């Protein structure tokens, strides 16, 4: 029998780092097959259902044959109008529905594709680390070179823009930022966004702000990058309905901001994928009509979960600071402790799945990320198990 041909991966695929979590995932699946009770605090995927009115709108729209055909890449005019109205209501930011908004099949689509529109081989992209891996993989796919901006606890997990060298900035064309931040849970002030605008103008750099977690907060409402004066002249913001309305599987998001940048992203999109299923867009319109009161119970649930896990971690000897937003807790480990080794220990000794910080970048070493996307009863059980684990 003839064996199949051996096709070699493209260089851009070879650049991708090895999947750090494969060993942890293998151990998790083995534990599940053995019947062990696993508490998964590793995945940032809301466990709560999508609100019923959104589901009902999807059902209504899905029965309309007009929504069964190809949808335009630009999305429904009604959806873009709803996004503009939501931004004005939530952030006080004015957007032109026809030129400054682009619906996306989840914000990840736009984040991964934006370098293809503006980065040439050899260009540099400023990437936060620890951070969402798509910032660097999208850069590599476009032939760009990531320049990493370390997010350190001593700087409140904000990049030190003034500390970037001229070498770092040579051929730098784009910068990703992300607040509220994954994985650290940090937020950014309006002053930081103003600083980012001035930095971008001075260095002729396009700013791409990932704002997926602005609606999961505990005290003060997080800011939009576009609230900073001049931001819309030099950047765009990616948003998503995933975390806001428990719609991760629906794949619906959008990019907003500087019209020429939106146009560039739209050109990429029109050549590599299609528009969002129109019935989902109608459901998105219904979601964006929700008031703060409609979401009070959701935020109350996350706040209770955060407080229970925070208290339990502290009692167990962990060093943690309460996140102001997102549904992640970024817990530091004793100096010299491997985050990957600790994650494997937690799984083997307690049945708890957590994410090693080094998986988000070298500056994430020494931290573990816990996700509060399980019921509070399971978090209380996790706390009891964590108290039995010695940190050193």
Image (cartoon, helix red, strand yellow):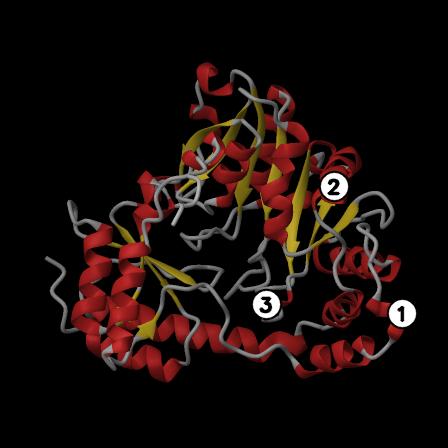
Question: What residue is disc 2 on?
Answer: 271
**What residue do we see at 77% from left, 78% from top?**
57
Q: Secondary structure at mark 3?
A: helix
Label ID, residue 101: none
Circle 3/circle 2 CB separation < 8 Å: no
> In terms of image quadrants, where is residue 250?
bottom right
- On screen, residue 195 versus residue 4, left or right, reads right
Q: Residue furthest front?
A: 1
**CA distance for labels 1 and 3:** 23 Å
Q: Position of residue 14 (x, y in %)?
A: 41, 35
Crowding at dot 3, Cα within 10 Å, few <14 / some 14-19 / many 20+, comes out as: few
182 to the left or right of 62: left
Q: How many numbered tags mark residues here?
A: 3
Residue 304 sits above or below residue 273 on the image: below
Q: Which one is earlier in the sequence, the residue at label 3 or at label 2?
A: 3
Circles 2 and 1: CB atoms closer than 8 Å = no
* Tag shown at residue 249: 3
Residue 186 position, x and y percent, is 45, 51
Helix or strand or loop: what does disc 1 sit on?
helix
CB contact under 8 Å: marks 1 and 3: no
Vertical placement of residue 254 versus 33, above or below? above
Residue beneath disc 1: 66
* Distance between mark 2 and mark 1 Cα atoms: 24 Å
Can you say whether 21 is above or below 383 in the image?
A: above
- Is 262 in front, or is 159? 262
Mark 1 is surrounded, within 10 Å at the Cα level, by few (under 14), some (14 to 19) or many (20 or more) other residues, namely few
Where residue 101 sits: x, y (%)? 78, 48
Q: Nearer the viewer, mark 1 or mark 3?
A: 1
């Amino acid at each position: 029998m003839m064996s199949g041909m051996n096709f070699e991966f493209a260089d851009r695929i070879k650049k991708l780092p090895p999947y750090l979590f494969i060993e942890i995932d293998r151990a998790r699946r083995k534990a599940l097959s053995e019947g062990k009770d696993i508490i998964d605090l590793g995945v940032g995927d809301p466990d709560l259902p999508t609100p019923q009115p959104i589901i009902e709108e999807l059902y209504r729209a899905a029965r309309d044959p007009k929504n069964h055909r190809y949808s335009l890449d630009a999305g429904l005019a009604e959806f873009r109008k709803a996004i503009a109205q939501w931004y004005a209501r939530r952030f006080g930011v004015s957007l032109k529905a026809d030129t400054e908004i682009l619906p996306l099949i989840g914000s990840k689509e736009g984040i991964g594709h934006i370098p293809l529109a503006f980065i040439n081989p050899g260009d540099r992209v400023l990437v936060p680390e620890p951070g969402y891996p798509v910032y660097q993989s999208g850069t590599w796919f476009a032939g760009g070179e990531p320049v990493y901006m370390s997010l350190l606890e001593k700087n409140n997990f904000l990049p030190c823009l003034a500390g970037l060298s001229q070498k770092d900035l040579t051929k730098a064309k784009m910068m990703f930022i992300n607040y509220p931040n994954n994985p650290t849970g940090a937020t950014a002030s309006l002053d930081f966004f103003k600083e980012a605008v001035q930095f971008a103008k001075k260095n002729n750099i396009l700013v791409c702000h990932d704002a997926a977690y602005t609606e999961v907060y505990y005290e003060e409402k997080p800011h939009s990058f576009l609230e900073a004066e001049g931001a819309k002249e030099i950047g765009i913001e990616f948003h998503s309905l995933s975390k806001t309305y428990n719609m991760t599987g629906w794949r619906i998001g959008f990019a907003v901001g500087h019209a020429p940048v939106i146009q560039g992203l739209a050109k990429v999109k029109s050549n590599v994928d299609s528009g969002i299923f129109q019935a989902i867009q109608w459901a998105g319109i219904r979601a964006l009509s929700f008031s703060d009161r409609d979401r009070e119970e959701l935020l109350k649930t996350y706040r209770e979960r955060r407080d229970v896990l925070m208290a339990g971690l502290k009692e167990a000897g962990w060093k943690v600071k309460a996140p102001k937003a997102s549904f992640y807790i970024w817990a530091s480990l004793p100096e010299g402790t491997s985050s990957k080794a600790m994650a494997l220990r937690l799984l083997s000794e307690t049945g708890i799945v957590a994410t090693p910080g080094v998986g988000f970048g070298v500056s994430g070493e020494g931290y573990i990320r816990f996700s509060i996307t399980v019921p509070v009863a399971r978090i209380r059980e996790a706390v009891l198990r964590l108290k039995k684990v010695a940190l050193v």
